[in-house]
Structures are given as structure tokens and as C-alpha cells.
């Protein structure tokens, strides 16, 4: 990997120093499952990962559920033999079910099987950060969290965290062992975590990496009403609330404000959307979904872009 230097932050109390943007590999799982992003070429995925790492990004976030192992396989191929290797984060708790739909299982034995499979696909001796993907079923989150603690104690994973948890759920599992990291959705069109979850994480010293900072593509400047209508059948966004009325019109208006600020600053709209999430003091870094090498150069600017209070107010419609 090249020694390009991006802005970095320490991820909570993990001791990991990560770039303020990381590569999100959700779309690299392809379109052949319930929450795919449409077809994706594996060779292009590998080229994208290589270019992101050469540009200075030092971590990748994926999940066993993304294409039910396919994203992890692609990531494993891309990082094989690299020295130093990027930090690799992945998630468990959503094994494949009938019809390539994710199940929700936090049973200890299921999680251990998932971890072993993820290690094999990624080709690593230990996963840098292992996360519970969803707190479902809620009655099993304590069993699931205890399983992650065991895996850490055995050295199969180095750090443990959760994704999509509420404050109450964070407190529940935190009574078993400290939660090192949290991965919530956060963007200009998904601000629900601002009121309680992000303040709680900051008070407790929980590291935060947010996902979908560009609103799953809504805030990139490339999304229009016409493009939404033409999304492929195997792109989950086609039926997503944010891409349909009554929210679509409001979200496109937000995207237009992001675009106006981006034009004034001479950067891509996606970089502005990413930088906006990084203004929150609780947020250590943002996961940026990348599917093509050319997306890397325009979006990594979000790691270092400092928006003024006036910029933020304009974006927010204030």
C-alpha cells in the first residue's frame, strides 16, 4: 500500500488509528440477494479497493450478509499479500436463509460458524473489528454479544462492536462487556441518531463509524427522479422509503442544497455530504460505498473537508 496520508482519527478506545473515510463493501456483494445494489463486476471491485488503498484509505468495512459471503471473498482477494494490510471490519448475525434472504440469528453457535467462515473468505488470521449487524432477535442480543466477547478472548477477532443498536440495547450488552464501537446510519436525510444515540456514544467513549453518509447515493449529485425510476430490479433502493414519495421530493431538495455548496467549494457533492457527518463530535469516521476506481478520488476529499457553520446551515436548509 502507498503511504498516502488522509486525515485520521482514533476509533474510540480501540487504539486503532483509522482514516476518516473507509471503504464500504456492501455493493461489492453484487445484486443476487435481497438487499443488493444491482450487478457488480468483481474485477472492477478489486480495482476499486486497490485504488482506495493506494489513495490512503486504511480500512474496509464489509459483512457476511453482503451477497452472503461474496463481498468478503472479493475483499479477501483484493488484500491478499498486501503489507501492510488494511484494517478489515465485518459483521455477523444475518446468515443466509431461504430465497437468499437474511435470517436473524444471534445464537452463539451460529455466530461462531459465521466468524470461521468470514476468516476463511477474508484470508486473515484475525478480524480487526467484528460487529453484530442487527439487534435481531432482540431477546438474543446478550447471547450474541457474549459470543463476540469469547471470540475476542480467543484472539479470532481483535475488537468488537455493534451496528444499528439503540441506547437501551447498548446499555444492555455493555453490562456484559464494554462496547468498543457503534455503526449507525447517519446522513443529512437520516438524522435520527443525533438526539440520543450519538451523544450516548460520545459520553461512553464508544467509537463511531457511520454508514450511508451519502444517503445511499441520494446525496452524490447523480440522483434524479428519472434515475430513481430506472434503478434495476435487483437494486434494493428501488423499494426504499428514501427513494419513493413522500420522502423522495424532500430528499432531492436536500441533495440540491448539497450540490450548491459543493459547486461553490469546488468539490463533489458526495464529499460535502460525507464532511457534514464528520462535523458531529461523536463521529470518528464514515463508511463510503465505492464501486468504481473513479469514485475514490472525488469522495476521499470528504475526509479533510472543513465545512463552515454557514455551509452547514445552508445544507440543512436553515
Image (cartoon, rainbow, N blue to C red):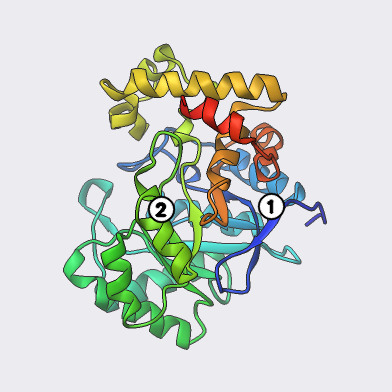
Q: Position of residue 275 (x, y in %)?
A: 60, 40
- In front of the other: 24 or 308: 308
Residue lying farthest to the bottom in this orientation:
154
The residue shown at (42%, 73%) is 179
The residue wearing badge 2 is 184
Query: On the picture, is 265 further left or further right than 312?
Result: right
Q: Give above or below for 99 relative to 224.
A: below
Query: Mark 2, residues whose alpha carbon is within 10 Å: few (<14), some, or many (≥20)?
Result: many
The residue at 39%/24% (across/down) is 251
Is 9 placed above or below 109 here? Answer: above
SS state under label 1: loop
Where is residue 40? Give x, y as percent. Answer: 50, 36
Q: Which residue is mark 1?
A: 57
Q: Residues within 10 Å of mark 1 (few under 14, many from 20)?
A: many
- Residue in the foreground of this view, choosing between 215 and 234: 215
Please indicate, yes or no, whether residue 24 appears anywhere in the rendered image: no
Above or below: residue 202 compared with residue 221: below
Relative to 262, 197 lies left or right: left
Q: Which residue occupies 36% across, 16% down? A: 229
Task: List x then y, in percent, for residue 185.
Answer: 41, 47
Judge whether residue 121 can be spotted in this image.
yes
Which sits in the foreground, 307 or 318?
318
Q: How far is the residue under mark 2 from the one under mark 1?
A: 20 Å
Task: Answer above or below: position of 205 versus 8.
Answer: below
Amino acid at each position: 500500500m502507498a503511504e498516502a496520508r488522509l486525515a485520521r482519527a482514533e476509533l474510540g478506545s480501540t487504539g486503532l488509528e483509522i482514516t476518516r473515510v473507509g471503504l464500504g463493501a456492501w455493493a461489492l456483494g453484487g445484486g443476487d440477494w435481497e438487499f443488493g445494489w444491482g450487478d457488480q463486476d468483481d474485477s472492477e471491485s478489486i480495482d476499486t479497493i486497490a485504488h482506495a488503498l493506494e489513495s490512503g484509505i486504511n480500512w474496509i468495512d464489509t459483512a457476511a450478509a453482503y451477497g452472503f459471503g461474496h463481498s468478503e471473498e472479493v475483499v479477501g482477494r483484493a488484500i491478499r499479500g498486501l503489507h501492510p494490510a488494511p484494517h478489515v471490519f465485518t459483521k455477523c448475525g444475518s446468515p443466509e436463509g431461504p430465497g437468499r434472504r437474511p435470517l436473524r440469528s444471534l445464537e452463539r453457535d451460529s455466530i461462531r460458524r459465521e466468524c470461521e467462515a468470514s476468516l476463511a473468505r477474508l484470508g486473515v488470521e484475525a478480524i480487526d473489528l467484528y460487529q453484530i449487524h442487527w439487534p435481531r432477535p432482540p431477546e438474543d442480543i446478550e447471547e450474541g454479544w457474549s459470543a463476540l466477547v469469547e471470540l475476542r478472548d480467543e484472539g479470532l477477532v481483535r475488537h468488537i462492536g455493534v451496528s444499528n443498536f439503540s441506547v437501551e440495547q447498548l446499555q444492555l450488552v455493555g453490562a456484559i462487556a464494554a462496547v468498543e464501537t457503534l455503526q449507525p446510519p447517519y446522513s443529512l436525510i437520516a438524522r435520527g441518531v443525533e438526539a440520543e444515540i450519538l451523544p450516548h456514544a460520545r459520553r461512553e467513549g464508544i467509537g463511531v463509524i457511520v454508514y450511508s453518509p451519502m444517503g445511499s447515493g441520494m446525496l452524490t449529485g447523480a440522483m434524479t427522479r428519472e434515475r430513481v425510476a430506472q434503478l434495476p430490479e435487483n437494486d434494493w433502493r428501488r423499494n426504499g422509503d428514501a427513494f419513493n414519495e413522500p420522502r423522495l421530493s424532500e430528499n432531492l431538495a436536500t441533495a440540491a442544497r448539497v450540490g450548491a455548496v459543493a459547486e461553490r467549494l469546488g468539490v463533489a457533492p458526495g464529499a460535502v455530504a460525507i464532511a457534514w457527518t464528520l462535523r458531529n463530535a461523536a463521529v470518528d469516521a464514515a463508511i463510503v460505498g465505492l464501486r468504481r476506481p473513479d469514485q475514490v478520488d472525488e469522495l476521499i476529499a470528504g475526509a479533510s473537508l472543513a465545512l463552515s457553520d454557514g455551509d452547514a446551515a445552508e445544507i440543512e436548509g436553515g
